[in-house]
Amino acid sequence: MLGKQLELWTVAQNLVRVVLPNHSLLTGKPEQTESVTLWETLEFLDAPCCDACGFPFEFDVGENVLCGRCEGKRPAFDRARSAIRYTEQSRKLVLDFKHGGRTDGLEFFAAQMHRAGRDLLHDAHILMPVPLHKKRLRQRKFNQAALLARALSKLSGLPYETNTILRAKNTPTQGGQSYLGRKRNVSGAFVIPEDKRKLIGNARIVLIDDVQTTGSTLEACAKVLKKYGAQQVDSLSLMRVVRPEPV
Ligand SMILES: [Zn+2]
C-alpha cells in the first residue's frame, strides 16, 4: 500500500517539476540556492513618492507632495505607481516575461502591483492594459500588460477591458530613445473606437503596463482617455525606470 502511495507521490513530484520550472526567473539558476538573493536584489517601490508621477522620495515629506517636474507641469495622467524599480537585475525578470514567454511569475507580479497600487485600485472603476499594435501582438503572442491586468482583476475584483484603447500606429521600440523622441513617437498613436467611448465617460481608469520608462506612452493614453471624458486616469506598472531626476 505504502509502496503504491510512494510511487504515486514520485509521479506527482515529477509532474510538478515538469509543470513548474525549478530555476529562478531572475538568473536561471536553481530556485533553492537563489530565492533569498532574488529578494535582496529587487528594489520594491512604495511611498514616499511624488503624488503625481510616483518618483520615489528618499524621505517622507508629507502627503500629496509633488516632485519638481510635476510641480512645474502636471502630467496628463493623475497618478502613476510602480511595484519594482527597473534595474540590471530586475530587467531579466521582465525580459523573460515579455520576450521569453514566461508567465510563471504572474501571480508574484500581480501581488506586488496590488501592494504598490492599493490607493489607485481602491478608487478605480476599471483596469485597461496599455495596448500593443496588432502586428507586435502577433510577434509576441500575448500582450503582457493584458496578462497583468487580468491577474490584477482577479486580486482586486475590478473589471478589465482590453479592446477599448487601441494602438493605431506601430511605433518603433522605444529603448534608447530620448524623452522627446519617445514623446514624438507615441503622439497620436492611441485611439478609442466609437462604440467603446461610452465606457470612458466619467470613468476612473487605471492603465496597466509592464515597464514605465519616460511616461510618454502613459501621457499619450491619458490624453486620449480624458478627451472622451474619463474622470481620472491613473497608471500602475510592474516596473519603472528611476533616473536620478524625474523625467
Ligand atoms: Zn512627479
Image: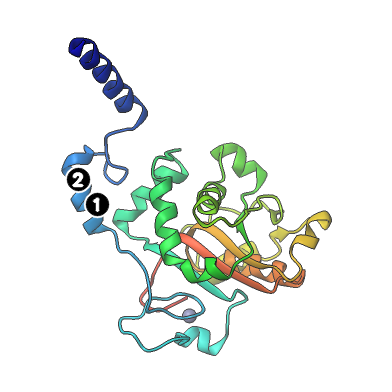
The label shown at residue 119 is: none
- Judge whether 169 appears above or below 81 on screen: above
Query: Is residue 157 toward the left or the right of residue 38 in the image?
Result: right
Q: Quadrant of residue 221?
A: bottom right
Name the residue rendered at 54%, 39% in the picture: 140
* Farthest-out residue, front: 1
- For badge 2, the amino acid type reads Glu
Horizontal and vertical percent for residue 152?
A: 51, 54
> Residue type at mark 1?
Leu
Residue 103 picture quarter: top left
Q: Residue at x 65, y 50 (%)?
A: 162
State if disc 2 and disc 1 touch (CB < 8 Å).
yes
* Mark 1: secondary structure: helix
- Above or below, comparing residue 31 to residue 242 in the picture: above
Q: Residues within 10 Å of mark 1 (few under 14, many from 20)?
A: some
Is any part of residue 109 visible from this angle?
yes
Residue for badge 1: 38
In which quadrant of the rendered image does the N terminus lie? top left
Outermost residue, left side: 33
The residue to which callout 2 is attached is 34
Q: Distance between the residues labelled 1 and 2?
A: 6 Å
> Would residue 239 be visible to someone looking at this image?
no
Q: Nearer the viewer, residue 2 or 182?
A: 2
Q: Nearer the viewer, residue 92 or 53?
A: 53
**92, 38: nearer the viewer:** 38
* Residue at 42% over, 76% down: 55
Q: What percent of the width, then of the height, locates residue 41?
A: 24, 58
